[in-house]
Image: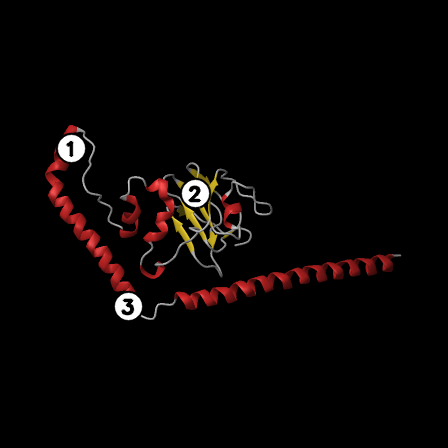
Amino acid sequence: MRGTKLVYLSLLLFSTFLAINGHIGEFDEVWRRRAQEADEWAIKAYKPDPINVTLAFAKQTGQALKEIKEAKLAINGTRRELKGGGKKYDGPCLVTNPIDRCWRCQPNWADNRKRLADCAMGFAKGTTGGKAGEIYVVTDSSDATSNPKPGTLRYGVIQKEPLWIIFAKSMTIRLHQELIVQSDKTIDGRGVNVHIANGAGFMLQYVKNVIIHGLRIHDIVVGSGG
């Protein structure tokens, strides 16, 4: 009887091993296809003259700093008067980062969030993220790895179609496992305070066309899954 039980147990373990192996094979095939697609997109995105790309970005940054310096000199006296009178400053936009300056100086930027994609510069120029997709709003700060709920960040980033992901309110998200981001996504944290903290971080592997902007990512710790 005992021998029969051992044989049965061995067969059960063997069949389980076959099932797991079959799943691993399918899993590996998915990642193999994603790796091949990533290689193809990397070749398309290759810049044959990286020095000129770097110099062009540096020139844009320098020009922004020069304009702001000139503006500050011109309004220095006005700012002192405003400081004493408690009036609201309404002079030139003083954002120094040329990418932020592209959208932040627009008073109605929140009505046209996807304009951020047009602000990409340097090696990222041409990146559109989820511009071609719908707006997806994160309303839930929880994180379930096995069955992500609609409204959570994880649910949004695993969708296959392009999405522009924004947040309904300020929140802190503790990721229980690495957040594996799919291609053609924008994660846009502007206008609220979004912290990714005290848990796992993001993983971008074998993907293309991703924009992450305005998040505060800190205190990332090792957990299951990475």
Q: What's the residue at 31%, 60% (across, down)?
A: 122
- Looking at the rendering, which quadrant does residue 90 occupy? top left
Q: Is residue 175 visible?
A: no
Residue furthest to the right in view is 1
The reply to whether callout 2 and callout 3 are in contact (CB within 8 Å) is no
> Three-letter amino acid code at disc 3?
Ile
Mark 1 residue element: helix
Q: Which of the labelled discs sits on residue 51, or is there none?
A: 3
Q: What's the residue at 55%, 53% (across, down)?
A: 225
* Mark closest to the chain's N terminus, 1 or 2: 1
Mark 2 residue element: strand
Quadrant of the rendering where the N terminus is positioned: bottom right
Disc 1 crowd rating (10 Å Cα; few below 14, some 14-19, many 20+) is few
The picture places residue 173, in percent across and down from the top left corner, at: 47, 42
**Residue assigned mark 2:** 166
The picture places residue 126, in percent across and down from the top left corner, at: 36, 58
- Looking at the rendering, which quadrant does residue 196 occupy? top left
Disc 2 crowd rating (10 Å Cα; few below 14, some 14-19, many 20+) is many
Residue furthest to the top in view is 85
Count numbered badges in the picture: 3
Residue furthest to the bottom in view is 48
Residue 186 lies left or right of residue 102; in this view the side is right
> Three-letter amino acid code at disc 1?
Leu
* Mark closest to the chain's N terminus, 3 or 1: 3
How far is the residue under mark 2 from the one under mark 3?
34 Å
Which of 224/84 is in front?
84
Q: What's the residue at 57%, 44% (across, down)?
A: 148
Residue 100 lies left or right of residue 82; in this view the side is right
**Residue assigned mark 1:** 82
The picture places residue 123, in percent across and down from the top left corner, at: 34, 61
Residue 115 lies left or right of residue 201; in this view the side is left
